[in-house]
Amino acid sequence: MTDDETPLIGDDGSRNARRTRVGSLLLLIAAVAIVVASATAKRDDGADLGACPQGRADVALLVSGSVRSFMIPNVYKSLKTNLIDFMASHCINVHPIMYLGLKEAAGIEHGGLPYPQAIPSDLDEALDHVNVAAVDFYEPTQYDSKQFPWGHCSKPVEYDRPTSVWAHFDKAQKLLCMARKVEMEENIHFSWYMHSRPEYFWYAPPPVDFARTLWDGQDTNHDTDAVQPTLIFDENWYWKYNDAFYVVHSSRADAFWGKGTGALRSIACVSPRSQMNPESSIFHVADYAHCNVRRGISLGHSAWPDRDGMGVHWCHGISEGNTTMIKACNKANKISIKANAKYRERAKDWLEKRAAAAAAEAEAAGSAAAKPAPPERPAARGPTC
């Protein structure tokens, strides 16, 4: 496995154990990227559910947004190794369900380089690798500003990135519909719904407390229980709730996403302490969905690429004293930037060859116009809505 494909740090049970183990192997990091042997450390008692004598829980991973860097091996392999496989080792089956756009829709205000073009065969390989349960694709939507909920209140609500806010819940409604169909086809029940983005890069697994919380709260009556959460969020994120990754219990999923942008209309006239943005909208929709118990879990050792398309990570939530994880994140940055640049060249070469082939076909046919190019995206898989 090359540095570009390395899933990086493994997990052995607890945050303290992870720090101890990684710290003892710092001399090996340069030689093996950031792969850490797990056999040298003992797991916490009860941290690993072993053969799953109590069965397994099923959790949906709802992923929406522009593909961005998902098809680059270090990104999708990190998702498989450090989230899906990690959760499976703790008796939780994660089922990826995706609604993806192949064109970047964030806009030019983010600056920097655009994300590289996704080669369809590479995207297919990525979807195979994570064993996607269902996937569909969309074209960027030009939302009509008249649809937005602001302007209908006695006091206007100031929105930051309104299209991102609107798209988040619009796409989530579609994903929830797909997830319900997966449940029916597979005869399973999703106890939790993770919501994430395609470019979210896991260079380390979440803490075991995350898996424990999902396991313990899967069958709880959350209408009466005052302990188990219905919303789990990254407590290290700067702006309260991270729209790139959060988790909602099944008992609140319909209220949270089932009405799509209807939830935004229901919270439109709240009086936010600051601008309404993707993060704060989750906070207010959680109120609307009666997520009365919320739990923050430190996910600061994972990071997602910045939106300039260069593969740079936000190494957020790592204390200055935790030099092990800071070094790990810096190493992840180097790996990601290198992998991104390498893929960018590969995608450029693919696009040039594709254009040349279309031009040659047109010339052979005696036509000035090239034939339509092959499909630019893989076929949808699984149930769609």
Image: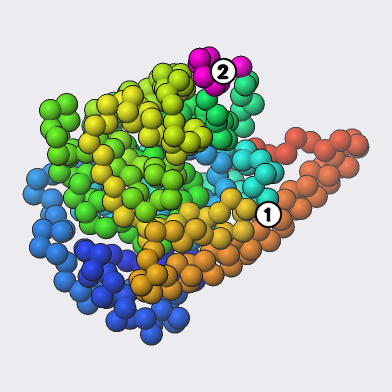
Q: Around disc 2, counting alpha carbons within 10 Å, would you say few (fewer than 14), some (14 to 19), or many (20 or more)?
A: some
Viewer-proximal residue among 194 and 164: 164
Q: Is residue 73 above or below residue 21?
A: above
Residue flagged by tag 2: what amino acid is it?
Gly
- Say which quarter of the image contains residue 216: top left
Which coloring applies here? Answer: rainbow
Which residue is drawn at the image coordinates 10% and 63% (left, top)? 45
Q: Earlier in the sequence, mark 1 or mark 2?
A: 1
Between the C-alphas of marks 1 and 2, the distance is: 33 Å
Is the residue under label 2 in contact with that under label 1 (CB below 8 Å)? no
Q: Which mark is residue 82?
A: none
Q: Main secondary structure of the magenta part?
A: loop
Q: Residue furthest bottom?
A: 27
Q: Is residue 154 magenta?
A: yes
Q: Is residue 103 above or below residue 48?
A: above
Viewer-proximal residue among 279 and 38: 279
Q: Which mark is residue 151?
A: 2
Q: Is residue 221 magenta?
A: no
Whole-percent x and y of residue 12? 24, 66
Whole-percent x and y of residue 131? 38, 46
Magenta residue span: 146-156
Q: Is residue 129 visible?
A: no
Which residue is drawn at the image coordinates 39% and 63% (left, top)? 318
Which residue is drawn at the image coordinates 57% and 35% (left, top)? 161
Disc 1 on helix, strand or loop?
A: loop
Whole-percent x and y of residue 146? 61, 17
Q: Which mark is residue 112?
A: 1
Disc 2 on helix, strand or loop?
A: loop
